[in-house]
Image (tube, rainbow, N blue to C red):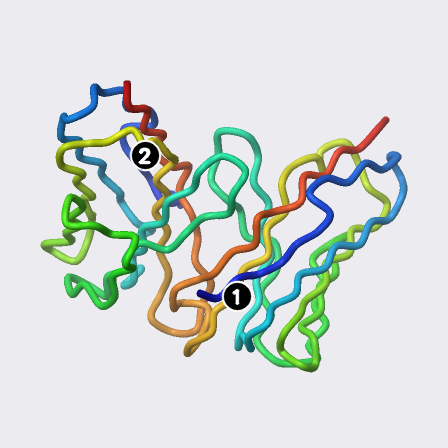
Amino acid sequence: DTGVSQNPRHKITKRGQNVTFRCDPISEHNRLYWYRQTLGQGPEFLTYFQNEAQLEKSRLLSDRFSAERPKGSFSTLEIQRTEQGDSAMYLCASSQISNQPQHFGDGTRLSIL
Amino acid sequence: GQQLNQSPQSMFIQEGEDVSMNCTSSSIFNTWLWYKQDPGEGPVLLIALYKAGELTSNGRLTAQFGITRKDSFLNISASIPSDVGIYFCAGAASTGANSKLTFGKGITLSVRP
């Protein structure tokens, strides 16, 4: 039984570069969520999918951010033209459609130089 | 936007002691969850609460969903060193635990052996 898997675990990049993260949810979980967590704060909601449909996006998700879940399984989160303020831990979670709690992966830590 | 309040920011207890944490909100939440996060890892679900007034236990942990739906409490009994970590409360205002979550800032728990 595998949990939510996120890759890479760490990403260091220069300001202005594009980065892409991947999340593999728990098998048969229909819902997939992205959150961002900065130091000393709790996770903040970014967006979520039900199967391949993106159902909600936070205003935190600027135009430079795009998330996809093309086949309703894994998801990618891309950040274009990265900025210093994008440095954070990006967490993915998944759950079933029924009223079941979200389970988180260990995140991708992004550092912008 | 909605916010969950957790205080104090840090708690220091002696091994074997009980500790209680609370989480409050100015808004109503329909589901409350408690997560624990260790450094460099994602949040791990401890307890999920679905009904106002509900009291649920998970081993040495007990949590309650406040009757007003604006607060929740987590109690840890007979603390042990591995209880060290950051404890987050999270609430879902919408249809359930599988909708977007709002997190508190967390409480860092230290346990002295």
Q: Nearer the viewer, mark 2 or mark 1?
A: 2
The image quadrant that residue A22 belongs to is top left
Q: Nearer the viewer, residue A85 or A28?
A: A85
Residue sitting at 74 percent across and 55 percent down?
Answer: B21
For the residue labelled by badge 1, is the local secondary structure a helix, a strand or a loop?
strand
**Residue A28 appearing in the image:** no
Residue sitting at 45 percent across and 48 percent down?
Answer: A43
What is the crowding at mark 2: few (fewer than 14 residues within 10 Å), some, or many (at least 20)?
Answer: few
Q: Position of residue A109 (x, y in %)?
A: 36, 30
For residue A38, side relative to residue B45 (left or right): left
Residue under label 2: A85
- Specify the amino acid type for callout 2: Gly
Residue under label 1: B91
Q: Position of residue B77 (x, y in %)?
A: 83, 50
**Residue B40 appearing in the image:** yes
The image quadrant that residue B64 belongs to is bottom right
Q: Position of residue A87 (x, y in %)?
A: 34, 31
For residue A57, side relative to residue A66 (left or right): right
Residue sitting at 30 percent across and 49 percent down?
Answer: A25
